[in-house]
Amino acid sequence: MDYRVMPFCKMWNGGIFNIPNDIVDKYLKMASEYQLKALLYIFRNGGQASSSAVAKALGQTASDIDDLLEFWVEENILATDGQKIEVVQKAEKKPQEEKKQKPVREILAPPRLTPKDIVAFLREDESIAFLLSEAERVLGRTTSHAEREMLVNMVQYYGLKVEVILMILEFYRSEKERGKAIGISYVNTMAKNWADEGIDSIADAEAKLQDIARSDRLWNEIVAITGIRHKRPTAKQREMVDGWFKTFDITMVTLASDIMKENTSEPSLAYINKILKQWTKKDISSPAQVQAEQEAFAKSKAEKSSDKLKSKPSYDLEKIKKITMDNTEI
């Protein structure tokens, strides 16, 4: 379907302003949605506007606007206060001087990236430009420099594919919408873990998300069964509970929880874990085996008690009786 601008309508009554062709030809894919909006606002206002004015127009903070407009400064399309035009023109003649070498994952922490570094990666890799644009769509807001740095490092440092990163972002958004109190650092931690696990395809990512959903369901069942107060598991607790269900079904875990409740005043996952470990060592895998083990234990305890009664006591009942009879003070 073809589209054309209506030549005669009320829209034209408000006037027009010029936009260079290169903004569309070169930056439609490279620049983010909010970067383009901010630039349009500046062009609309005679080519000059404060970050606070742009922020008010876009519903963003002034610091976020400064971060995203840094892109246009690095591209020599905008200049900041005190920056001379001649300096910008010299930079245009030698664009290769600012080109950075891609960081490699041989250091302990992801490298710090400046706005210039990010622009360089945008020029080199269209998929990164797509990622940053889609990230703002998924999050429903403009991304800060720190977030853009984080996303670029997910590709360049952790080696994740763009489609996998977008799945992480979608998962993060869905968790936020469900009311989970998680910050954007959750995304970075998740990306690092996925990179360490070698998740490098959509199929791998979908399988991982299914594992997470299963783990969440199991945790919710544990909360309901045991009555523990923890609504969100720690990484260690999640790993422990997941391990239970690799060996036992919900019936056996519930049985272990019932035993825990009979012997403790407060719900204890550690107590359940101890019971299940003992069952694993004894190759117990069914309620019938648990009952048989408990009956054997009770029988053994009763026999030991009977043996103690048969043995000579460490006290003389007759002597105690005689002393009692002779004691007239009682």
Image: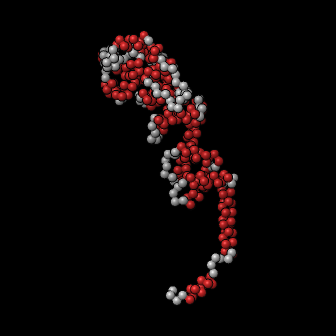
Give coordinates of residue 33: x percent, y percent: 42, 23
* Picture colour scheme: secondary structure
Q: Residue at x 44, y 12 (%)?
A: 94
Give coordinates of residue 187: x percent, y percent: 49, 34
Q: Residue at x 38, y 19 (%)?
A: 73
Q: Residue at x 55, y 35 (%)?
A: 193
Q: Nearer the viewer, residue 291 or 328?
A: 328
Q: What is the total number of numbered labels drawn onto the structure image?
A: 0
Position of 73 with respect to 315 (left or right) is left
Relative to 222, residue 43 above or below: above
Give coordinates of residue 32: x percent, y percent: 43, 23
Position of 193 with respect to 115 (left or right) is right
| Viewer can see residue 11 | no
Relative to 22, residue 307 above or below: below
Q: Quadrant of residue 158?
A: top right
Q: Nearer the viewer, residue 165 or 14?
A: 165
Q: Residue at x 38, y 11 (%)?
A: 89
Q: Quadrant of residue 95?
A: top left
Q: Nearer the viewer, residue 82 or 59?
A: 82
| Viewer can see residue 83 | yes
Give coordinates of residue 180: x percent, y percent: 46, 41
Q: Residue furthest top?
A: 93
Position of 300 with respect to 326 (left or right) is right
